Amino acid sequence: MTDKKDLLVEIGTEDLPARFLFDQASELNDILCNQLVEAGLSFGRHQIFCTPRRLAVLLEHLDTCQPDQWVERKGPEKAIAFDEQGHPTSAATGFARACGTDVDHLSIEEDTGKPRLVFREQRPGEETLSLLPGLLEQTFARLSIRKRMRWNETDSEFIRPVRWLVALFGTETVPVCAFGLTGDRVTYGHRFHSPHAIRLEQPGEYSQVLETRGCVLADFALRQKVILEQVNALAADAGARPVHNQALLDEITGLVEWPRAVLGGFDARYLGVPKEVLITTMQDKQKYIPMVSKTGELLPQFILISNIDSTQPERVRQGNEKVIVPRFEDASFFWQRDLSHSLESRLEKLKDVVYEKQLGSMHDKTRRVASLSEALARETGADPKLCRRAAMLGKCDLLTEIVGEFPELQGIAGRHLAMHEREDGQLAQAIEEQYLPRQAGDTLPQSACGKVLAIAERLDTLAGIFAIGKKPTGVKDPYGLRRAALAVLRILIETGLDVDLHASLRLAVSLLPDGLRGDAVVDEVFEYMIRRLHTYFSGQEFAPDVIDSVLASRPTRPHDIAARIEALRSFRKRAEASSLAAANKRIRNILKKTGPAGSTPVRKELFKEEAEDTLHAAIEALSGDVESLFLQRDYEQALSRLANLRQPIDSFFDHVMVMDDDESLKTNRLALLARIDALFMHVADFSRLQS
């Protein structure tokens, strides 16, 4: 049994970018693990560590030696390797020499029907310690680094200057040379609390030694847990609720090694500035955690995470309170300047903002979105005039100073300005909601006007970018069209808007500049968006064949598509579903071969078999009610009624020859099948359902 030892690799650096810290450590771990696996080495649990000054990986129970390996090489064919007298030719002796052996030690084996020389040899595995220097050098070289730095006379490059390198296998150091350093067992603790060198005796003690002797919590997840516990305790004492998201927590965690939460405050007069501006200032500029009351009102308090356990925390608090003042002063200044000009006064200036060279200015886009919003409002029951005005004012906040300073506040700034100018409340809400959802899983617009504006804005973008030939290719999607398409589909489906997507796209394309309009663009964008539905419904665990079956019937209303898919998922659980799907597939295959039956009426007087009459009677008895249910989009009930056709259809195929020599009989029977096909196609193409 192969012996096992733990492996520790640590790259000690100058302060690393906090935002990418965990991803960089994860990549180091993944590349190293893959290198070891490729070398035939097995290991147990692996754990990553990362702080602003280090990236580290700990692997437990790594093999101390590669397993023995069989080496196989195929040589020339027997006919080439030996002459007529059976003596080895130069081809055979050359192959044997290349393998380091004699011809007598080679075997002859069949290979694709032809005998050829084969060399096999069992080679002992190499010691892991001798392999590790090369493996680690390759691992470091494969790390993806966006911006590389050089810091010494060597050609070494890394995201930040490397100051120490730990490579410890069991109790032995790995003699790897990288970054101008040689692998060692010495690490360093906190820059202020424990700056001295710390000697590691074995990998397993790494985390504990750094915490107890180095004042460093090297485990990213543990450090974040400690931060959250401290933040929640301070907030609870203050009777408040902290405001943070995962991205902010990750960045704060990446900024500290020995976190200590401190409660700070600011002058309440700044609360006259919209809270989103203050929150963004605290979170983005200072990495503070704002505090709100239980009712959601911003409080003049924040929590900062210090990287030192100060003996004078009051001075830490005062210093940070002092730093935030100029930030808030700037924000307040920008906001007061923005309040002095109305949104509408900025509309004309949008003509100077280029949206896209071929698609015109932001003012041109605004006018297109306004016309599209007005039309969508009529279709969805929203107020057309209100939606048009919301669209006309929707992009005006792009010219405000506050959005210039905080681009992420577009829409939010517009809402506050609209409320200040006493615009309709729903209009103000729509200006912000046009950007929802901002990312996957985000909340959707709630107001009728907001839904319309969010859809119109994205449909114009999709239509315009496709029209100028800049649709997404591969993983490249610079205009975010995939996200835009999914956002429109989510709004239509999840908020219950019954909108004809194809017709809306036709209107969006018709509003584009001359030379960019055309049915081909409409169809291309529509197909692109419909393909996104596979992703959307697959994420909700709908079976692929159910999705394909519904989409094959070419519906154009996403909310209707969702209703059909849900009904079909329920229906296929019934015993009749499989039989009806098989029959429908047979019907479709017959109709494909003979061509569409069109609107050819079924003539009862041509029935020759009882099964024909029975099936026709069943269809006639059901069709009226089923058609009515389809109009009401009660697909589940309609399919339930259609399930009664299972027995008559099975009997029809058992007793009736569809492709009769008598042309009139054949045509009549095809017309009967076409009636069935048309009924089921109200919901889906059942022939695509898997058994």
Image (tube, helix red, strand yellow):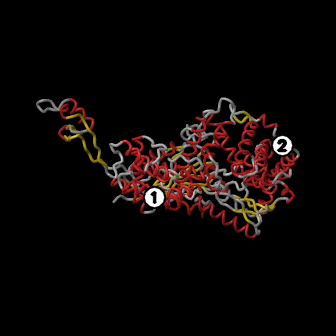
Q: Position of residue 1 (x, y in %)?
A: 33, 60
The residue that disc 2 covers is: 344
Element type where label 1 sits in the image: strand
Q: In screen coordinates, is 223 left or right of 185?
A: right
Q: Nearer the viewer, mark 1 or mark 2?
A: 2
Can residue 92 be seen from the camera position used here? yes
Q: Earlier in the sequence, mark 1 or mark 2?
A: 1
User: In the image, what residue occupies the spot 45% across and 42% down?
Assistant: 596
Tell me the kind of residue under disc 2.
Answer: Glu
**CB-based contact (under 8 Å), mark 1 and mark 2:** no
Front-most of residues 71 and 171: 71
Mark 1 is surrounded, within 10 Å at the Cα level, by few (under 14), some (14 to 19) or many (20 or more) other residues, namely: many
Tell me the kind of residue under disc 1.
Answer: Asp
Q: Position of residue 540 (x, y in %)?
A: 54, 57
247 shown above or below 472: below
Element type where label 2 sits in the image: helix
In the rendered image, which quarter contains the C terminus? Answer: bottom left
User: In the image, what residue occupies the spot 77% across and 68% down?
Assistant: 238
Front-most of residues 426 and 472: 426
Q: In screen coordinates, is 232 left or right of 269?
A: left
Q: In screen coordinates, is 48 left or right of 334?
A: left
Front-most of residues 452 and 321: 452
Front-most of residues 621 and 395: 621
The residue that disc 1 covers is: 6
The alpha-carbon separation of the residues under discs 1 and 2 comes to 67 Å
466 shown above or below 453: above
